[in-house]
Amino acid sequence: MTLSTSTRAPGLVRRRVVAGVAAGFLGMGAALGSGLMATASAAASTTITGVVLGVGANETQRIVTWYSSADTAQKIQLAPTAEIVNGEFPASAVSFEAVGAANTSTTGFNRHATISDLRENMTYSYRVGAEGNWSPAYSFKTRAFEGDYDFLFFGDPQIGSSGDRLKDQAGWEETLKVATAANPNTELLVSAGDHVESANDEGQWDSFLAPDQLRQYPLGATIGNHDVGGKSWEQHHFTPNTDRSAQYYTGDQATRSGGDFWYIYKDVLFIDLNSNSYVNPADGSAGGDAAHVSYVTDVVNKHGSEAKWKVLVYHHSIYSAATHSTDGDNAARRKDFTTAFSDLGIDMVLQGHDHVYTRSYSIKNGQKENPAEQPGAADVFPGPGGVIYATANSASGSKYYDIKKPGTTGTGPDGLGPDPLNPSNYWFNSVENQEHVRSYVKVSVKADKLVLENIRSGTCAAPNAAVEKGLSCVNTAEGQPVGSIVDSTTIHPYHGDGQAIQVNVPNPAPGEFGWTIDGYNGLVNLGTAQERNGTSFEAAGKINPILVSDSRRTLAPWSISANVGDFQDADKKFSGSYLGWNPYVLDGGAGAEAGAPVLSSFDDQGKGLSVSSGLAAAVQGHPRGDARLGADLDLKIPDSIAVGSYRTTLTITALSS
């Protein structure tokens, strides 16, 4: 009889495994969306609404907040999107228990939970609720935790302020859709506040939360003056690292929203203030800003060194150009805030409230830092203490304020006079724009610069509620279409007289573990079996050598094993257990140690190579390199086996951690 084996791995002959990637986490690429549906609930006793994805303390976290109709134990369930099959979350899904309380501004209950230990460059799906009462599943993507990225800043949606909630919602949804589609490197959404017109109007909150993007991108939510008068803002937005002391509220903390908070996302330290609390809560005096300055100072002193850039966000713009530019509280803050922000090295301040777009000159201690800086400069080079202040226009089109003419009070912290270089603007503004069209601000965070752009997300056409209701509009869709840029500037950091030197150190290549047949993977022909002692037939041969390569930095253990099935010739067969082997290392490397010999079951009544047996392995900490493996094959079969030409397959399995 003639005997032979073929050597193969399941699927491809050559297989490589990237180190450090857990099984089941490979090959994720689902588009962001809310298309995955939760498993049908057995009993719809709890209704989940208002799900919103918020920022966490850093890029490895997200905070999810939602409303529940029942006061039940609930949680977030999270899994890699690639592991979800037919809407079913896998048994390995991770859970994060939620906490919350009864709503005070409306009926029902609020819940929130923090997702932690996220991994970079992943697509995750999540749902909230409990067994039998899950929300739909939503998805979000993480990116590299170091390097460049974009975030988008949105001025007051103020849903309901036009008098037509659904028109306002349509404009808000369109802006988020347009902005995220046009900017694929967006990782974060930031609001300027005034999410709704009436603080506790849950219909308006439903409209604000309607866009799918608010469940796909983390939102850094800011409190506006229209949000602060009730608890709905806090019930819908639970924020990280939040100080909810009395000085960061206006009025009764039990009935109003408030608090200052901070977070770090990659190379930016964000500090978000409740600018509604500008008075001293103890006596009503105008000293409340001192508490905000103290908060910013404390955060910068403790965490400023952890980021390259420092960005403040609050609602009330102190350098705007429209209705609120002359407000008394903003006038006070032009004195209270500006010197402190310059001293603390703040790079940029993002604001809303005035429903107009402005970008300031570089401001230091309440003065224009460089009198020669030109209006609308495409590149700005702030010196030490120079701060750029930007005000975002309406992201929904619900309301716009027209630009006011400068006064005659001169320049400096107390002045609202004209810009000597452009007298139609206030002295502090490099750019002022009002077309009565929706827009948003894009900030590109680079290692050596910040790029700030104001971009149109609409035209005079609907959805643009304020214009639909009769407000004039000066935009021309042909010359100023959706996606066109209103303003763009690059903010370069100050390096003094020295030369800044930078090197980007990437993540080290993880290396690879893999194996392949060394050379041609021909038939392993054991030849014609020879009769021995009148009781058996025997044959011998060698496997085709196997080359193992391991360049992984983890120096993780690995093993190569193999097994065979039955030898067959048409309808005749005999067990693969009659095949044994003696492994060895032909060329040492990669920590390879040969496996133990395996006898034919003819000799020891065992299972031979019909079960997986080790060819070679390496332990944790082995050196990197290559190894060449071989094995002598030994076949012993009873002499009762029918004559024939039998074949089997040696299936090779590689394992690595």
Image (tube, grey):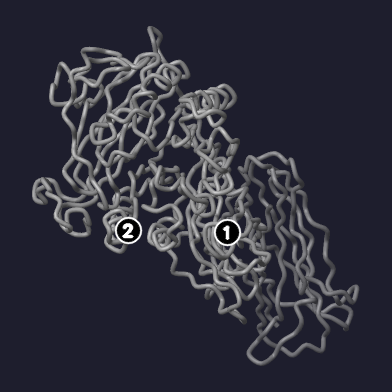
Residue 249 x %, y %? 53, 38
Q: Is residue 591 left or right of residue 503?
A: right
Residue 507 location, quadrant: top right
Q: Is residue 605 above or below residue 424?
A: below
Residue 574 in picture, x, y percent from top left: 75, 84
Q: Is residue 239 above or below residue 311?
A: below
Instruction: Say which residue appears at 61% left-offset and 62% top-offset.
Output: 77
Instruction: Identify the amino acid type marked 2.
Output: Glu
- Specify whether 572 is left or right of 276: right
Is 509 in front, or is 504? 504
Question: Where does label 1 land, which residue?
Answer: 103
Disc 2: CA contacts within 10 A as few (<14), some (14-19) or many (>=20): many
Front residue of 243/361: it is 243
Q: Position of residue 238 (x, y in %)?
A: 55, 49
Residue on which the image places disc 2: 173
Instruction: Identify the disc placed on residue 605.
Output: none
